[in-house]
Amino acid sequence: GEDVEQSLFLSVREGDSSVINCTYTDSSSTYLYWYKQEPGAGLQLLTYIFSNMDMKQDQRLTVLLNKKDKHLSLRIADTQTGDSAIYFCAVPRDDKIIFGKGTRLHILP
Amino acid sequence: DAGVIQSPRHEVTEMGQEVTLRCKPISGHNSLFWYRQTMMRGLELLIYFNNNVPIDDSGMPEDRFSAKMPNASFSTLKIQPSEPRDSAVYFCAIKGGNEQFFGPGTRLTVL
């Protein structure tokens, strides 16, 4: 079955770039997602990338996809305190979405 | 979160008691998912429904857990009897297009 792996914690100083990495096993997905979970809330779709793309940029967010290595990353430029959250890599499979365990981003002053 | 209402938002109960968690999509949806989130295990899919029919309940921990979706606008997740290891945040989500929309979750604490 699908397996989505990501590190559990990341600490970054305010103003620096954050890079959250993810690896997955199933390469047949048409697109891959990054979801964000803020404290006390449910997950919300942050961004996505089509599998035929290598990179997608949206303001401070950059998504990189390496299909050969089955590696997905999310880069947040100029990390701010409001970026403190849990970030989930997610891959659709049939009617479901397979989520990683989430990476908790902690912002250092 | 505006698309899915969950109640209660917080539940504290004693071991052995029955717990019922509720989910109401604001507009009826045919696909509905129940997840559980803990620090140790992360986000786990418990069960999902399509057209109000349970499609995959392989994530339901054991017989103490049951879920129903009597119509497109309502679903329940019941735990009977509850145990301390059931303490977690339980999320309901609906499918819209190619993404899922999550409710705010119910934080369950079993003492």
Image (cartoon, coloured by chain):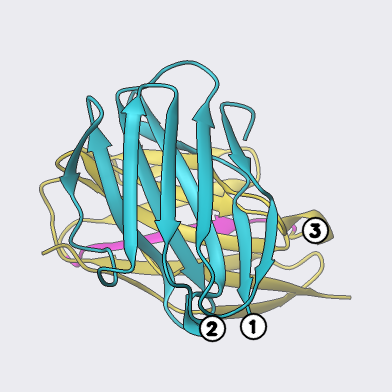
Chain colours: A yellow, B cyan
Q: Nearer the viewer, mark 3 or mark 1?
A: 1
Q: How many marks?
A: 3
Spatial CA span between label 3 and label 1: 37 Å
Q: What crowding class fits label 2: few (fewer than 14 Cα within 10 Å), some (14-19), or many (20 or more)?
A: some
Q: Whole-percent x and y of residue A14?
A: 82, 68
Between A69 and B62, the one lying in front of the other is: B62
Residue occupying image coordinates x 36% and y 21%? B72
Labels 3 and 1 touching (C-beta < 8 A)? no
* Quadrant of res A23: bottom left
- Return the residue at label 1: B111
Q: Chain of mark 1?
A: B
Establish if A104 lies above or below A38.
below
Labels 3 and 2 in the same subunit: no
Label 3 crowd (10 A; few <14 / some 14-19 / many >=20) = some
Left or right: A99 as drawn, with respect to A106: left
Cβ atoms under marks 2 and 1 closer than 8 Å: yes
User: Disc 3 marks which amino acid?
Assistant: Gln
In the displayed structure, A50 sits above or below A16; it is above
For the point 15% across and 61% down, the residue is A68
Element assignment for label 1: loop
Name the residue tied to disc 3. Answer: A80
Q: Is residue A40 magenta?
A: no
Q: Are marks 3 and 1 on the same chain?
A: no
Label 1 is placed on what type of residue? Leu
Give the extent of the magenta segment.
A69-78
SS for tag 3?
Answer: loop
The residue that mark 2 highlights is B84
B101 displayed left or right of A13: left
Image quarter in which the N terminus of chain B is found = top right
